[in-house]
Image (cartoon, rainbow, N blue to C red):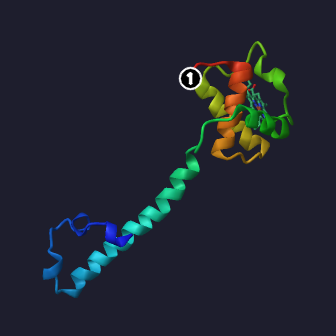
Amino acid sequence: MVSTISYGELNPLGLNRHKIHNGAQQMMTKTRVFLFFVATAFTFPLTSAWAAERAPDAAHGKTLHSKSCMGCHDNSQYTRANRIIHTFEDLSARVKFCDAAANADFSPNDLNDVVEYLNADFYKFGK
Ligand code: HEC
C-alpha cells in the first residue's frame, strides 16, 4: 500500500527524495508515513462502527423488538394518546435510549431495523 501513496502528498515542503541525504529528514518522512497509517487504521473502524451498513430491515427489527423491548412496556406505548414521540428523529433517539435502558446492546444496523419496524407499524412518519 505504501507504493500507492505518491511521495509528493506526504512531502508538503517539496523536498526532492533523491536530494535528501540527511537522515533526520528521511526519518521525518518515515514518521509521516507511519502516522498516516496509524490515523487511517484507527479512523476506519470507528466510522464504520457508527454508521449502519445496509438498508433497514423491519422484519428483523420486529424480531429484535419482541426479544428485547417488551420488558417494561408493550406495543400500546406507541399508540397511547399522550405519546412522547412526534418525529422520526424523536423515534431514533428514543430507540437508542431504550436500547441502553433494556441493555439490549443493539448494533447500528439493529437500531435502524427496530426504528424501521416501529415506524412502519405504529408511527408512520415520513422520512
Ligand atoms: C427499562 C425499561 C424499558 C425497556 C426495557 C424499554 N423501554 Fe421503551 N420506554 C420506557 C419508558 C419508561 C417509556 C416511557 C417514557 C415516558 O413516557 O416519558 C418508554 C417509551 C418508549 C417509546 C416512546 C413511546 C411513545 O410515547 O411514543 C419507544 C418508541 C420505546 N420506548 C421503544 C423501546 C424499544 C425499541 C425498546 C427495546 C430496545 C424499549 N423501548 C425497551 C422504558 C423501557
Identify the residue position indicated by label 1 in the image.
127
Instruction: From the top left corner, tell me how far across and down residue 35 is, in percent.
Output: 38, 70
* Image quadrant assignment for residue 25: bottom left
Amino acid type indicated by mark 1: Lys
Q: Residue at x 27, y 77 (%)?
A: 28
Q: Residue at x 59, y 41 (%)?
A: 54
Relative placement, left or right, of 54 versus 29 is: right
How busy is the neighbourhood of tag 1: few (under 14 within 10 Å), some, or many (20 plus)?
A: few
Relative placement, left or right, of 48 versus 98 is: left
The answer to whether the beta carbon of the residue marked 1 is less than 8 Å from any atom of ligand 1 is no
Depicted 39 relative to depicted 85: above or below: below
Depicted 113 relative to depicted 122: above or below: below
Q: Residue at x 51, y 51 (%)?
A: 47
Instruction: From the top left corner, tell me how far across and down residue 2 is, in percent.
Output: 35, 72
Instruction: From the top left corner, tell me how far across and down residue 64 is, in percent.
Output: 78, 39
* Image quadrant assignment for residue 56: top right
* Image quadrant assignment for residue 127: top right
Relative placement, left or right, of 52 versus 39 is: right
Instruction: From the top left corner, tell me how far across and down residue 21 is, in percent.
Output: 16, 87
Q: Residue at x 49, y 62 (%)?
A: 42
SS at circle 1: loop
Q: Quadrant of ligand 1?
A: top right
Relative placement, left or right, of 69 versus 88 is: right
